[in-house]
Amino acid sequence: MRGITYVLCLVVVTWLTLGGVSPLSAQWTQGRVRTAGNSVLSLWISPNGSAGSNVFARTGESGVFVSTDDGTNWVAVDSGLTDFTVCSLAVPGTYIFAGTYGGDVFRSTDQGAHWTRIGLENTWGAGLAFSGAYPFAGTWCRGLFYSTDLGTSWDYEYGLSAVSVLLVSGSGILAGTDGGVYLSKDDSTNYFQLNSGPTWNGIVESFATSGGIVYAGTYGRGVFYSADDGSTWNAVESGLTDSDVTSFAVFDTVLFAGTDGGGVYLLSGDGSSWVPEATDLGNSHVNALTVIGGYLVAGTNGGGMWRRPLAQMIIG
């Protein structure tokens, strides 16, 4: 009888550890990175998000860092950077693009070891994205730019200003602005405003796609979702105690959201509510999220880098 009891206890503890949250294990652990102000603003993965891939982090004042061990250790990769206030990163294959608050765009062809300035000066950079081989750069002061030669020269897209974030999806190029979401279906030639449904009063700060649904995180308005390529939008806010949604991360069909003061949230399986996942997170001001090697990695404002096993948050 005692042997049977031992086996049952072992099974329960194993299930809790692998499929749920183990009460005996730590949840969030801090990565070894120190930047000026200890703030991490965004995260990008190259090449495919699998274990052992490089994870790149941009910071507000210390340039770019890279991790090759799923977010445990981080080293600076900034040779050639003349502006360390990096505000955006894009990692299309073998290239890495970095946009700065000063408006310059830098490009690396060797995984960040060396950087070369390639133009787009005198702008205030906000977001970078790729549609095929074409990079797009959203700026706050001069609108949207695109390049047909990998950033050597840039063309200005008239009529669209204050672009905060970009997303390339099956429907086209989505641009988040201080006045809602715009869509281009012809590689940035024409943009159409997609504001049907809610009244947008907040800046669009983040985008994600999961299960064919587009999610938009806003400053002060929470999360909106669209199941028809942006034609109509609805709010999903139950359980979300912080309405400033800075970032998303997707694992399979599971969606995580990072907020400016409420930590990390997980969207419920039916998509109707948010579950807080910030227990033991050393800093609730989350700027960036990504998934790498079985971990959810969070970059925080003033608290450095943190990571947590996905198995502790996703049952089954």
Image (cartoon, grey):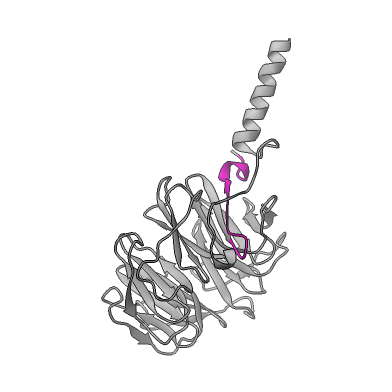
**Residue lying farthest to the top in this orientation:** 1
Q: In this rendering, would 43 be left or right of 77?
A: right
Q: Is residue 89 visible?
A: yes
The residue closer to the viewer here, 208 or 29, is 29
Q: Classify the position of the N terminus by image quarter.
A: top right
Give coordinates of residue 120: x percent, y percent: 36, 82
In the rendered image, residue 314 lying in the magenta stretch gets the answer yes
Give coordinates of residue 12: x percent, y percent: 67, 27
The residue closer to the viewer here, 237 or 30, is 30
The residue closer to the viewer here, 297 or 35, is 35
Residue at x 58% of width, y 78% of height: 196
Could you tell me how many numbered marks the image carries? 0
Dividing the picture into quadrants, the one containing residue 310 is top right
Give coordinates of residue 283: x percent, y percent: 66, 59
252 up-or-down from 125: above or below? above
Give coordinates of residue 208: x percent, y percent: 51, 63
In the rendered image, residue 69 lying in the magenta stretch gets the answer no
The residue closer to the viewer here, 220 or 24, is 24
Residue at x 62% of width, y 60% of height: 303
Dividing the picture into quadrants, the one containing residue 232 is bottom right
Span highlighted in magenta in the image: 300-315
Q: Classify the position of the C terminus by image quarter.
A: top right
Q: Is residue 166 visible?
A: no
Dividing the picture into quadrants, the one containing residue 38 is bottom right
**Residue lying farthest to the left in this orientation:** 149
Q: In this rendering, would 303 be left or right of 57?
A: right
Residue at x 48% of width, y 73% of height: 87
